Image: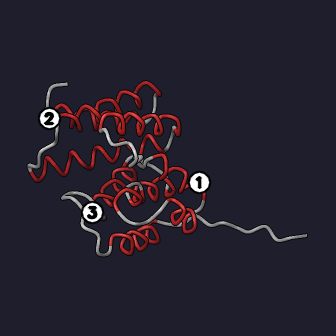
Amino acid sequence: MSAIPILRLRDRSEAIRFLIDAYDGVTVRRGKGLPHAQAVADILRATGSDERTQVVGLLHDVVEDTPRTVDEVRDDFGDDIATMVAALTEDAAIRHYAQRKRALRGSIAAAGSPVVEVAIADKIATLRHARLTGGPVTDRKLRHYRATLQLALAAGLATALCLQLEALLGEFAPG
């Protein structure tokens, strides 16, 4: 009889250590990187998300922003979390912005909850940062955010987060 490996859930502090290492020496845009990841996880925690979802919130951009891969996320955090991070990661091979974002929304919608919640929390964190710093948010980004909001609403997911995102979007431009 062979032993069955026991997988333990990695916690937020382990994800933060992973991110500190991943972002070491990496230049990111204003409002991104570890502070953004922490903001997303904090938004998720404030709405009652479990620790696993908060870890996904922390890791959601690591593959896009750093040399880390989904396989490295899988090695450190398991298949479940890696699969969710992959669903939240844009396909860099798709060059056209609108097509890349449409494919990303399709991946998010197919993954369902809690990936949708992380995607909505990500947009809330970005808009809060822009509001705080007076940073610009492009029309095409706002269109993507509205489309992501619509897919969450249509699926009946992340209702409390959707209300927050809808209010923030109303501050930026008419939709």
**Where, by quadrant of the figure, is residue 64 drawn?**
bottom left
Residue at 15% across / 26% down in the picture? 174
Residue 15 against residue 132 in the figure, above or below: below
Instruction: Look at label 2 and name its amino acid.
Output: Glu
Residue under circle 1?
80
Out of 48 and 7, give the one closest to the viewer.
7
Residue under circle 3?
35
Give the Cα separation between the discs numbered 3 and 2: 22 Å
Residue at 31% across / 65% down in the picture? 34
Judged from the image, the secondary structure of the residue bearing numbered disc 2 is helix
Instruction: Look at label 1 and name its amino acid.
Output: Asp
Indicate the quadrant containing the C terminus: top left, top right, bottom left or bottom right.
top left
Q: Which label number is shown at residue 171?
A: 2
Indicate the quadrant containing the N terminus: top left, top right, bottom left or bottom right.
bottom right
Crowd class of label 2 (few under 14; some 14 to 19; many from 20; radius 10 Å): few
Q: Earlier in the sequence, mark 3 or mark 1?
A: 3
